[in-house]
Amino acid sequence: MKKTGLFFDFLVSHAKIYGFIFPSSEIYGGLNAVYDYGPYGVELKNNIKEFWWKSMTQLHENIVGIDSSILMHSDVWKASGHVDEFNELLIDNKDSKKRYRPDVLIKEHIEKNFFKNPKKKEEILSRLYQSLKKKDLFDIKILIDELEICDPIYKTKNWTEIRHFNMMFQIKNKRNLYLRPETAQGIFSNFQNVKQSNRMKIPFGIAQIGKSFRNEIIARKFIFRMREFEQMEMQFFILPKEEIKWYEYWKNIRFKWHLIFNLEDKKNYKLCEHDHDHLAHYASAGSDIEYHFPFGFQEIEGIHSRRDFDLKNHEFFSKKKLRIFDFKKNYIPYVIETSLGLDRLFLAIFYSSLKKEKLKNGNIRIVLKLPYYLSPIKGAIFPLVKKDGLPEIAKKIFNNVKINHKLFYDQKESIGRLYRRQDAIGTPLCFTVDYKTIDTDTVTIRDRDSMLQKRIHIKEISKIIEKETGLEKILKKLSYLI
Ligand code: GAP
């Protein structure tokens, strides 16, 4: 099946039916742009996390991990610039009562109406970027009026003025607390603690996986843009004069890390350098690793040079020294950041792995061809029939092997149906106990991708699962690139 918009609808429903992703609070009608991970979703997510965590903290001896709190002192967000700078533009339609980002309204309008007139399109975009740069909200509103842009639903032009909208969620209490919009600030505020407790020497990195929250105005596209999401971030502290060297190093390593998943085609990935007008308030250089989603190339990871922006501001606000003291000099280190959206990576992996395959007999099978080391369930064990002692043997094997691997036991349906269900959730290996098992202590093993079957001894099951689905092979491959 060609991966069109319809395929994306199929993906969303597959994710729900098979227990990967559910809309949050569904029994109450759901909550816009918030999703829950189901039993297989959480396993897949944990496996992605484990791979990233080991890639960072195990393969690099100078990177350590932390797990900082989501709630932080409110001054953190003043120092980090998020209180003043973490804004989007906002416009309301008075009739539909819907909120929009004016820059997105304009871009969507010209995409739709001027696709045959690239010169005009370029002219409008250039005016928009100029006004955004100058923070000229008045001119952006004039542009909306001149282009006669209507509310996409109500088709009216009854707009409010444009204003700034801070994207942090504020908690209603006396201390002005916020839900963190990035995990990075927990790393910066623990810079001294980690450096001292673990005797870290420049260059060194601190990695963290955790939830972040942003009050996105336009939150669409399933788990691509959510209000609550997870980030896997790493801040690498360096000598200021080595900024370019390490920026290039991390761009290169992170891009290779994504390619190692071998998802469909390498052409689905792009590394794009930002020009200066499009950098976040904290960054002096930035690149995005983009993946080709059904709605076009979109960012999954950002690599930024944040120089001393954060530590310097935290020094100023906290009045604590956040620097390196060498023999003769002391300095604030520069920072290269790698910031990956876990949910976006999940979506890229899920999207590229989900296939509708036509079999030789003309049947269609739905198969989730996840990399084996990421699959939620590593192996499934079935008895061929529900009698003659086969379920007992299969259960015994299951109980022995489950100590080492995440397995699934099933005897409810015919073997063909059991295979199809495991294909749909991406289980790499299925083991079937049949009558031959009774005399030979052997079972059949079926490979998900080739669908080939062979016989192996029961004693080999655990080792084969480890070899085929463990992280060892892929981490070794990655270690040669670092
Ligand atoms: N600490 C730097 C930082 O947060 P960012 O480019 O704003 O940089 C990093 O975010 C990554 O976090 C993005 O590349 C994206 O994968 C993910 N991300 C950002 N906003 C998101 C959202 N609303 N929903 C899901 N993922 C998001």
Image (cartoon, rainbow, N blue to C red):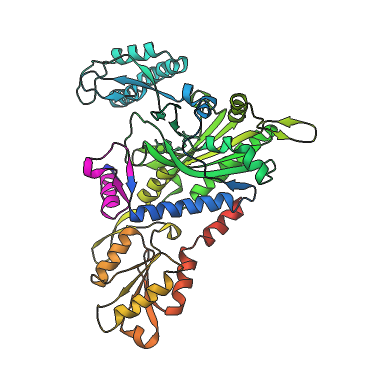
Of 186 and 424, the residue lying toward us:
186
Name the spot of residue 368 as percent of width and height, x first. 34, 57
How many marks are shown on the rendered structure? 0
Of 311 and 354, the residue lying toward us:
311
* Residue sitting at x 29%, y 83%: 389
State which region is magenta.
Answer: 6-35
Relative height, residue 82 to residue 132 (above, below): below
Residue 415 horizontal side relative to residue 208, left or right: left
* Residue sitting at x 34%, y 85%: 436
Q: Is residue 260 visible?
A: no
Figure quadrant of residue 324:
top right
Figure quadrant of residue 441:
bottom left
Most extreme residue toward the front is 174
Most extreme residue toward the bottom is 439
Name the spot of residue 327 as percent of width and height, x first. 79, 35
Relative height, residue 47 to residue 180 (above, below): below
Figure quadrant of residue 411:
bottom left
Most extreme residue toward the right is 328
Residue 27 horizontal side relative to residue 46, left or right: left
Relative height, residue 56 to residue 313 (above, below): below
Of 410 and 179, the residue lying toward us:
179
* Residue sitting at x 49%, y 40%: 69
* Residue 160 part of the magenta-drawn span: no
Q: Is residue 254 visible?
A: yes
Name the spot of residue 308 as percent of width and height, x first. 62, 29
Name the spot of residue 135 as percent of width and height, x first. 44, 15
User: Which quarter holds ligand 1?
Assistant: top left
